[in-house]
Image: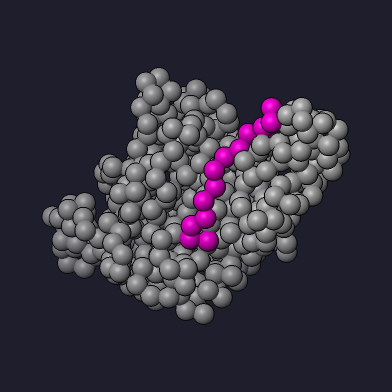
Amino acid sequence: MLRKEQNDLVTQTGPGTPMGELFRRFWLPALLSEEVVEAGGEPVRLQLLSERMLAFRDSEGKLGLIDEFCAHRGVSLWFGRNEEGGIRCPYHGWKYDVTGQCIDVPSEPAASGYCNKIKLKSYPLVEQGGVVWVYMGPKEQQPPLPAFEFSTVPQSQSFTSKRLQECNWLQALEGGVDSSHVSFLHSGSLNTDPLFKGSRGNQYNLSDLSPVFEVVESDGGLFIGARRNAEDDQYYWRITPWVMPCFTMVPPRGDHPVHGHFWVPIDDENCWAWSFDYHPTRDLTEAEVQAMKDGKGIHVRYIPGTYIPLQNKTNDYLMDRAAQKAGITYSGVEGIAMQDASLQESMGPIQDRTRENLVSTDNGIIMVRHRLMKAARALAEKGVEPPGRDPESQKVRSVAIVLHREKPFKEGAHDALHAEAGKAHTTI
């Protein structure tokens, strides 16, 4: 368990907090490209790391992310007019470009240069892999562009979605690195979900309910191995990479696409759960993409016109007690993503980790917390930049593999854990 001050350290990500400053050293998923397609189109409110911002594509097609509020009287610029190279506040006509620079104050003579003195906070954006990424840290510490494989393969090989999750980012992430719950919570879905079924690995998951965890450090985070008994003198390994601060990948199943997540804080009590599927060597099929759009696998169905899950706390996640009793779904909640989210949200907005009782299968979670706290303190106290910012640290894969019992997983799966363009992923 953590002490209260440790729990505060790892869960608080607002401006000036140690964990918030750590997050600001990375490129983070901010928006789907589909949200800001049109030049001169509708602006989008965006809150990340407890900062309220406005994203828009100006009339020339340039992307910008600026403070949501006009420097004059604090009006939300979401009500503004996107016109002729900038967004104009509807209250008194102040206008800003995509860098946050004020370019027109109608009430002041242009010759006075008054508007040149006014500039809103802004952050750089880049588009890659159907995602708009943001960097919110010091300009001089800006890292190279993201190198995660799902965002660098051709778009025909990748699908990405996002959903609102009403809890702190860390309890969502911790679910992402916890392979032990799969044998229980997702047991009803392993052989029925079209993006999971048909894998021999499913049978190992369902036949061995007591996985043994081994955790090793990587350059950018951790490799978390969960081993289960296989035939003869072999183990079935499911290896989950975690790259600091909030990237995880689900170990693959058969020739299905590979899944993964980012868990990006909105504020301390809400986060965006980003979910991606990609295949490193082929296009996604029409059936796979349709299944993802229909909320299968790690994706969800939405309340129309939003990124809010159709199943949510206001309707008890549409729990079906009859399906739970019949064993169709272990928890009574349909869908892998919402099975996870429903339980993570049930912990409360911020889980009180001082009340936990951890066991050996929680080793991955323990190590994640340890590395996060160590990196946040090193940055705050010594100015040491956190690991996981370089491209090589991000070129990782999850792995499902059967190895001889004497073979350490990091040795036996060494090459498979590295993403290489055109190379098939290691799966079972």
> Is 128 contained in the magenta span?
yes
- Which quadrant of the structure image shows residue 60? bottom right
Res 61 seen here: yes
- Residue drawn at (57%, 40%), measured in percent from left and top? 123
In the rendered image of this protein, does residue 42 appear above or below residue 115?
below
Residue at horizontal 48%, vertical 31%? 138
Does 7 sit left or right of 100 as displayed? Answer: left
Residue 338 percent location from the top left of the image: 58, 58
Q: Residue placed farthest to the top in the image?
A: 381
Q: Is residue 416 left or right of residue 40?
A: left
| Residue 62 image point, x, y percent | 61, 52
Q: Position of residue 51 (x, y in %)?
A: 63, 35
* Image quarter hosting the C terminus: bottom left
Q: Is residue 330 visible?
A: no
Task: Kindly indicate the quadrant of the structure image that contains residue 237.
Answer: bottom left
Residue at far front of view: 111
Find out whether residue 67 is within the magenta segment.
no
For the point 32% across and 54% down, which residue is it? Answer: 396
333 and 337: which is toward the camera: 337
User: Which color scheme did the rendering employ for the protein?
Assistant: one colour
Residue displayed at 32% across by 47% down: 393
> Start and end of the magenta stretch?
116-130
Give the image location of residue 70, x and y in percent: 76, 35
